[in-house]
């Protein structure tokens, strides 16, 4: 028998007996009490609640009569295994009636912000059960070095570093992790930074939220890419009323189109999300020069920089910035695993000091054990080994994807020159990618409709994203063939509806 706390209120709108019955019915229908589960005896329940046993017995008798409980001789009371299928009428609480009655709070009137109204990317939690999961941002568990990660976690939790993961470090980060970021990760992006210019975050979204909270006022003009990262657009929209959507071309955002009054510009230059294009060095220099000239800040999300397995890496914007106009966002979640939720900010000390103070008020610091485990994973070379393994696997899938797309969906996409883990696809006119996605799910195929990436009214509906990080390479070609057939069916369906 599980411990289960039931609360009643004397002097409440309903009798004690009614409250007991309502609490049991709610617990049964909500799944808190399972079928055939024993419940406390009348004697024990009366003692816990501080009421007479007779009150509990009457409540139990009502539950027996309604089919929610069954009594077993010499055993006690149990939840009826027929209680949920029977869907017996749930007792309706009697509203308190008095001249001093107070209504529930009007939450809509109280909210300063309503993030629940913002639209976000939705992914099924059971994506791995689908045969063709062309889903972005998930890990193939066959590629992850679980034994090495487990060993790092074991070392972290040992006595040697007991204080490192049990102490409250206030606003400070794990020094070993900061050192690994400085020495192993940032130099690959051409970034040299001091310890006081780095802050560990709970992923890229956490970093973006702190940036927006510290720098965006209601009238601050923030430029974001279109199509672009929906979370960035949503986060900035919570703090400013002036978001400027700038179209991206084959080289990313166009610096000449950025308005002179812009104060912040959010970009994903390494691997634009979602179009996968890479900003060339010439345009990066042009963007840096315009930021210097117009004195706006560049928020660089170095999206998927670790998955460049095709070309030589292009220097990050931060590495080209001599005046402190670039705030750099990096993430370990993309290269290690997305559920890790660890990332980092690199910016001038003045900004990091404020961000550190804000983070303290939000979460104090990311969990110490996760920081130390990640630090050991980096320091022992496991991260480098993982990257090499991912490059081999992703390149093989990238080549198969390119071939399959050319075979079954020609002229619908450009092969990402950077590599990465996804393709951005423009389907035929008249295609509804959300309707396509729904049809695909019924046949075990997952895609990501592209409408969510556009911030403009009436966005195109024929775009979608195909991820390949978590799909077995043997299933890519048959999955694309199935997708092609579903597109033809959707076009026929759309044409029939139009007629």
Image: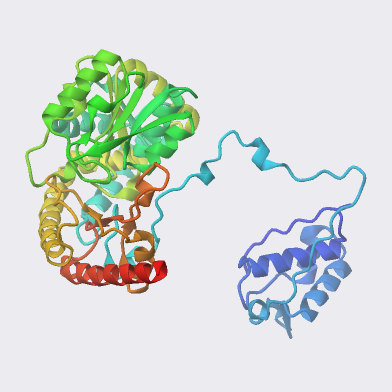
Where in the figure is residue 408, as x and y percent of width and height?
A: 16, 67
Residue 233 visible in image: yes
Which residue is rendered at x = 29% and y = 37% of the image?
Answer: 247
Q: Nearer the viewer, residue 121 or 414?
A: 414
For the point 51% across and 41% down, the residue is: 115
Q: Is residue 21 above or below residue 155?
A: below
Name the image quarter holding residue 65.
bottom right
Residue drawn 53% across the image and 45% down it: 117
Q: Position of residue 253 (x, y in %)?
A: 24, 33
Relative to 495, does residue 335 appear above or below in the rendering? above
In the rendered image, residue 473, in percent from the top left (x then y), is placed at: 16, 65
Report the colour scheme.
Answer: rainbow
Q: Residue at x 89, y 42 (%)?
A: 100
Picture coordinates of residue 93, whole percent (x, y): 80, 61
Q: Which residue is the extreme one toward the front?
A: 499
Report the quarter where the C terminus lies. Answer: bottom left
Judge left or right: residue 314 versus residue 212.
Answer: left
């Amino acid at each position: 028998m599980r411990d289960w706390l039931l609360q009643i209120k004397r002097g409440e709108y309903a009798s004690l007996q009614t409250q007991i019955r309502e609490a049991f019915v709610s617990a049964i229908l909500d799944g808190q009490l399972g079928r055939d589960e024993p419940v406390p005896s009348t004697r024990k329940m009366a003692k816990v609640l501080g009421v007479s046993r007779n009150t509990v017995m009457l409540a139990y008798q009502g539950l027996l009569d309604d089919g929610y409980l069954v009594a077993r001789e010499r055993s006690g009371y149990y939840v009826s295994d027929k209680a949920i299928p029977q869907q017996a009428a749930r007792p309706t609480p009697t509203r308190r009636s008095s001249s001093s009655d107070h209504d529930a709070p009007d939450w809509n009137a109280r909210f300063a912000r309503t993030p629940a109204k913002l639209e976000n990317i939705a992914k099924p939690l059971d994506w791995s059960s689908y045969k063709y999961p062309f889903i972005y941002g998930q890990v193939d568990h066959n590629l992850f070095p679980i034994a090495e990660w487990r060993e790092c976690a074991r070392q972290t939790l040992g006595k040697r570093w007991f204080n490192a993961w049990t102490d409250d470090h206030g606003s400070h980060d794990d020094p070993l992790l900061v050192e690994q970021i400085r020495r192993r990760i940032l130099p690959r992006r051409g970034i040299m930074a001091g310890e006081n210019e780095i802050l560990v975050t709970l992923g890229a979204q956490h970093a973006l939220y702190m940036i927006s909270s510290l720098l965006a006022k209601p009238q601050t003009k923030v430029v974001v890419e279109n199509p672009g990262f929906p979370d960035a657009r949503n986060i900035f929209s919570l703090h400013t009323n002036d978001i400027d959507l700038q179209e991206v071309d084959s080289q990313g955002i166009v610096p000449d189109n950025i308005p002179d009054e812009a104060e912040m510009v959010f970009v994903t230059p390494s691997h634009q999300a979602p179009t996968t294009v890479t900003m060339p060095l010439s345009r990066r220099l042009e963007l840096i020069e315009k930021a210097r000239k117009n004195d706006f800040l560049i928020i660089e999300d170095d999206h998927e920089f670790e998955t460049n397995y095709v070309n030589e890496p292009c220097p990050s914007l931060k590495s080209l910035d001599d005046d402190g106009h670039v705030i750099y966002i990096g993430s370990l979640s993309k290269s290690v695993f997305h559920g890790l939720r660890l990332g980092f900010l690199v910016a001038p000390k003045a900004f990091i000091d404020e961000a550190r103070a804000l983070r303290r008020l939000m979460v104090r610091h990311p969990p110490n054990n996760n920081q130390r485990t990640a630090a050991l994973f980096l320091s022992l070379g496991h991260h480098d080994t993982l990257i090499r393994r991912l490059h081999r696997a992703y390149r093989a899938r990238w080549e198969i994807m390119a071939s399959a797309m050319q075979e079954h969906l020609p002229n619908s996409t450009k092969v990402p020159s950077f590599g990465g883990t996804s393709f951005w696809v423009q389907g035929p006119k008249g295609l509804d990618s959300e309707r396509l996605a729904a049809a695909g799910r019924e046949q075990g195929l997952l895609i990501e409709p592209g409408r969510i990436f556009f911030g403009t009214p009436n966005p195109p509906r024929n775009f979608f994203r195909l991820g390949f990080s978590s799909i077995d390479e043997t299933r890519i070609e048959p999955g694309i063939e199935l997708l092609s057939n579903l597109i033809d069916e959707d076009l026929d369906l759309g044409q029939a509806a139009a007629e």
